[in-house]
């Protein structure tokens, strides 16, 4: 019988062939059996409203009412939250109803939040519905925001126009067909972060504009697309659905390479290059919604930082 040496062992040649073939087959099977694996990954919202009292409100003009909202925090950490109150008649809420705007610390487990609402003495009669939701808020400012830290506690440093521009509720910029602008200078590379809720798109859009000594940047947020550009240079569009909830947006502007990257809730959406290059602009920052439209928006904060921070 013919033999062959395998390592330091001499075996029959037929057995050496079997060993060789087996090794190849095992290697091939091992490679093709687990080239990759995809598993579900989910991060759930930890906060939930369990109950509320009273279950309905029936008041006369000039009256106030206390309410209790029972919440559940399923995470092992604390959260800072506000109760967000929204009547289905926005104009009535703006003119005739006030709500408490306290920031609560929600610990793990179940807890009651106490709030109030008040109806103005000159309020007309109405039948409406009230939506109460939890909104997580920031209690600390990011240390890197060195160009602008705007928490919308005042409009003192801002110019404005449009149908409605106000701070309502406290700590939020609220505009209906209106916008605000702030004169400031920009470096060649910078990052802007903001939290936005579009209550109603109507016939308009949320707007976000930056004018530097080098160029103009116009970002429009619609319900189904975002776009950059203007009527003079044209537009770049990206399909993206935006609902009426709060979302965190981040925009990085690199004037050295002519790129604008747009992130939504930490995910990179697209890179725009449609930029209005010009040097005759007054540097300023503009935010709000399309002027004189029916679009209604709330902004929670705006941070502008030197450099690119994706």
Image: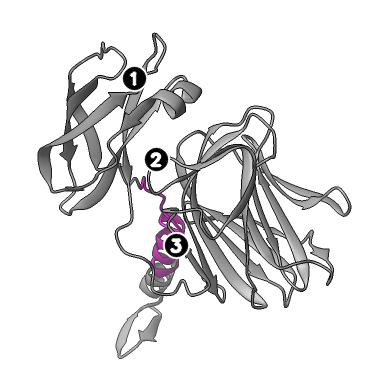
Determine crowd level at label 1: few under 14, some 14-19, many 20+ residues with C-alpha closer than 10 A: few
The residue where tag 2 is placed is 169
Sequence order check: which comes first, mark 1 or mark 2?
1
The residue where tag 3 is placed is 31
Which colouring convention does the figure follow? one colour
Sequence order check: which comes first, mark 2 or mark 3?
3
User: Is label 2 in a helix, a strand or a loop?
Assistant: loop
Of the 4 image quadrants, the one containing the N terminus is bottom left
Label 3, label 1: how far apart the Cα atoms are: 76 Å
Label 2, label 3: how far apart the Cα atoms are: 59 Å
Relative horizontal placement of residue 290, taking residue 165 as reference (left or right): right
Q: Nearer the viewer, mark 1 or mark 2?
A: 1
Q: Which mark is residue 121?
A: 1
Relative horizontal placement of residue 99, taking residue 224 as reference (left or right): left
Considering depth in this image, is 35 or 134 the residue closer to the camera? 134
Relative horizontal placement of residue 274, taking residue 300 as reference (left or right): right
Residue drawn at x 35%, y 24% is 131
Considering depth in this image, is 16 or 306 the residue closer to the camera? 306
Q: Which residues are magenta?
A: 22-41
Considering depth in this image, is 204 or 242 the residue closer to the camera? 204
Residue drawn at x 23%, y 34% is 48
Name the spot of residue 71 as percent of width and height, x first: 18, 35
Q: Is residue 183 above or below residue 59?
A: below
């Amino acid at each position: 019988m013919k033999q062959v040496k395998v390592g330091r062992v001499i075996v029959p040649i037929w057995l050496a062939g079997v060993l060789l073939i087996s090794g190849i087959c095992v290697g091939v099977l091992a490679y093709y059996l687990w080239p990759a694996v995809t598993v579900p990954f989910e991060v759930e919202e930890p906060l939930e409203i369990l109950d509320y009292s009273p279950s309905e409100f029936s008041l006369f003009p000039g009256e106030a009412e206390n309410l209790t909202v029972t919440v559940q925090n399923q995470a092992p950490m604390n959260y800072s939250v506000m109760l967000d109150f929204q009547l289905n008649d926005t104009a009535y809420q703006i003119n005739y109803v006030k709500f408490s705007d306290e920031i609560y610390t929600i610990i793990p487990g179940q807890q009651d939040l106490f709030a109030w609402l008040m109806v103005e003495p000159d309020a007309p009669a109405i039948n409406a519905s009230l939506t109460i939701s939890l909104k997580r808020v920031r209690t600390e400012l990011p240390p890197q925001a060195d160009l602008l830290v705007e928490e919308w506690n005042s409009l003192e440093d801002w110019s404005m126009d449009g149908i409605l521009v106000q701070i309502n509720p406290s700590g939020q910029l609220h505009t209906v067909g209106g916008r605000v602008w702030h004169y400031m200078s920009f470096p060649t590379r910078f990052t802007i972060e903001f939290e936005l809720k579009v209550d109603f798109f109507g016939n308009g859009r949320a707007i976000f504009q930056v004018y530097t000594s080098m160029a103009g940047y116009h970002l429009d947020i619609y319900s189904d697309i975002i776009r950059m550009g203007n009527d003079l240079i044209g537009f770049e569009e990206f399909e993206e659905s935006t609902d009426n909830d709060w979302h965190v947006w981040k925009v990085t502007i690199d004037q050295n390479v002519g790129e604008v990257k747009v992130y939504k809730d930490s995910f990179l959406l697209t890179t725009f290059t449609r930029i209005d290059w010009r040097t005759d602009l007054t540097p300023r920052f503009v935010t709000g919604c399309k002027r004189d439209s029916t679009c209604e928006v709330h902004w929670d904060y705006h941070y502008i930082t030197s450099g690119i921070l994706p």
